[in-house]
Amino acid sequence: MSYYLQRLTFAIATLALPGLVNAGPYDGVYKQTENADCGLVGVDGGALEIKDSIFYGVEVQCRMTRPVNVVNMDATLYTMQCSGEDQSWAERAMMMMPAEGEGLIMVWNGYAFVYDRCEEPGDSDAGDAAKTE
């Protein structure tokens, strides 16, 4: 491979890398309640979102740092650097996918939450089309 072709390949890979590095296994939009509006993120009655290692909750954002795989579990423990309502704090939180279905289990000190994943736009249309056939 020529020197210039190697440099070009490296440059293209470097440009694509940030998107791959930031995407995490828990990225997605999750319902706070069964009837949550998945189009509203970060408000009561809406949804929660994890994107590019940032958790967007109700009036709070947490940068998910220092990931540690939990031994013998498909789970990750994070240090959450949070801010909201003019305050900043750090806490630990563990995240894992449920054994069945699609969603997220999030455990904070003393609290555990189970969230269903919001459907991607267009997912419900495919299901509706199958029902009408």
Image: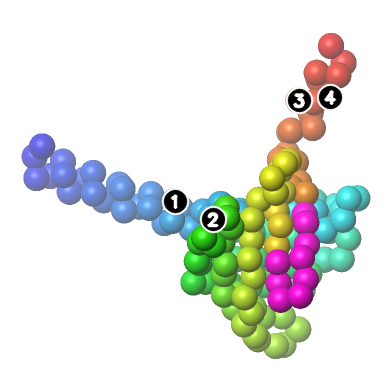
> Residues at badges 4 and 3 in contact (C-beta under 8 Å)?
yes
Label 4 CA crowd tier, 10 Å (few <14, some 14–19, many 20+): few
Q: Position of residue 13 (x, y in %)?
A: 31, 48
Query: Circle 3 sits in a helix, a strand or a loop, which is it?
Result: helix
Q: Nearer the viewer, residue 100 or 104?
A: 100
> Where is mark 4, residue-wise?
128
Query: As drawn, which residue projects farthest toward the front?
Result: 72
> Where is mark 1, residue-wise?
20
Q: Nearer the viewer, mark 1 or mark 2?
A: 2
Query: Circle 4 sits in a helix, a strand or a loop, which is it?
Result: helix
Query: As drawn, which residue projects farthest toward the bottom?
Result: 87
Query: Circle 1 sits in a helix, a strand or a loop, which is it?
Result: helix
Q: Which secondary structure class fits the magenta region best? A: strand
Mark 1 or mark 2, which has the lower sequence index? 1
> Where is mark 2, residue-wise?
72
3D distance between C-alphas at marks 4 and 3? 5 Å
3D distance between C-alphas at marks 1 and 3? 28 Å
Three-letter amino acid code at the position of disc 1: Leu
**Span of residues in magenta:** 107-115
Mark 3 or mark 2, which has the lower sequence index? 2
Mark 4 or mark 1, which has the lower sequence index? 1
